[in-house]
Amino acid sequence: MRQHPPLTPIISALPSTVPFVGPEAQERDRGRAFRARIGANESSFGPSPRVIARMAGIARDMWMYCDPDNHDLKVTVAAHLGVGVENVVVGEGIDGLLSLVARMYVAPGDAVVTSLGAYPTFNFHIAGVGGRLVAVPYENDRESLGGLLAAVATDKAPLVYLSNPDNPMGSWWEAAELIRFIEALPETTMLVLDEAYSELGPTSALPPIDISRPNVIRMRTFSKAYGLAGIRCGYAVADAQVIRDFEKIRNHYGVSRMAQIAGVEALADQDYLKSVVARVASGRRRIAGIAEANGLKPLPSATNFVTLDCGDGAFALKVLQALLSRDVFIRKPMVPGLDRCIRVSVGLDHELDIFAEELPGALAAARGS
Ligand SMILES: Cc1ncc(COP(=O)(O)O)c(C=O)c1O
């Protein structure tokens, strides 16, 4: 047998697993397509018709590399948020930006604080740089701001992650509480405030953007409300020096020409965004109604999904499996405490019809009747 060249110690200790098994992989395994794709918090409503037309119109230009400065998109984001262009960095979705933050702030062995059961891709990137994750349990289905602060202090963490609104519970903190949290953080700790769902919740959950704080990075994406998950484009807003630090390591040709132009067009069509936000709110009400009609408790949500309390973890897992076997793709949190829930993304009407049709049978199967 030939030898493999040695990996670095950090990488060789990691498992070859991904944080998510995608619906495509599940379909390949099952040999059958899902009928309702309501598990990955995508936007089934898709991008704005203006964005679709623009993307179709520029297909022929894809022989050209992208602008490695992401100039037009940065200018558009900066104007949209009322910050300077020097306060914006663009990346391959929030996921891509999280990988950069891990490399920027975490040395091997450093403690990194997050919530137990929070967005797993963050943990994946921290593991990749040899960080030591400290996971604080949720309290009442919300990330525990007090618990996160205490862990940051105890472990002298250079980095803390908070998603607001939160995935997988859909819960959120109001701006005033977040501001108190930010003010209480040590200046030596960087906060990643993941606002992937920011457009879909109450505006009262969004603190004003304050780029004068060098220890806060706000991240947003075109994947959720803007309906462009497949294009992989997101951005971070921060103090100008922090943005220059991203420049040291980012993948300069990572955000495609198609993604940059789609992002500019998407931000320009705020009427479409408003219509999606309204459709998502009505989809959340519909999911909650279907859940209640079947004896499940919907949790309040500021996102494009609703988390449904099924009572206990073993039962919720059976409900998930029964829905998957009925060709309904959903997901569920797996950590103790949160695992009593399943998570259903807002989909198109016909997808929620399928969910409504299949849920009673899935619950009966889970109960073993
Ligand atoms: C909290 C959170 N952050 C980030 C992402 C991914 O964002 P992007 O598609 O921009 O990488 C998701 C997607 O589910 C999410 O739930």
Image (cartoon, helix red, strand yellow):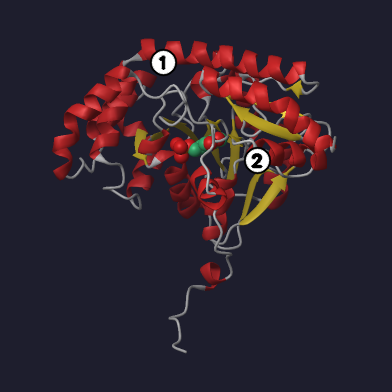
Q: Which x, y percent locates residue 181?
A: 65, 30
Q: CA distance from mark 2 to mark 1?
A: 34 Å
Q: Nearer the viewer, mark 2 or mark 1?
A: 2
Mark 2 residue type: Ser
- Identify whether 339 is placed above or below 50: below
Q: Which residue is mark 2?
A: 325
Residue 9 in sight: yes
Q: Is mark 1 within 8 Å of ligand 1?
A: no
Q: Which x, y percent locates residue 182?
A: 60, 31
Dot placed on the residue nearer the N-terminal end, 2 or 1: 1
Which label belongs to residue 273? 1
> On the picture, is 27 further left or further right than 250?
right
Callout count: 2
Residue nearer the viewer, 322 or 93: 322
Residue nearer the viewer, 365 or 345: 365
SS state under label 1: helix
The quadrant where residue 257 appears? top left
- Identify whether 231 is placed above or below 278: below
Residue drawn 36% across and 32% down? 87
Q: Which x, y percent locates residue 170?
A: 64, 27
Q: Quadrant of the C terminus?
A: top right
> On the picture, is 215 further left or further right than 331?
left
Mark 1 residue type: Leu
SS state under label 2: helix
Callouts 2 and 1 close, C-beta under 8 Å: no
The quadrant where residue 4 appears? bottom left
The residue carrying pointer 1 sits among few (fewer than 14), some (14 to 19) or many (20 or more) residues within 10 Å by Cα, namely many
- Identify whether 360 is placed above or below 25: above
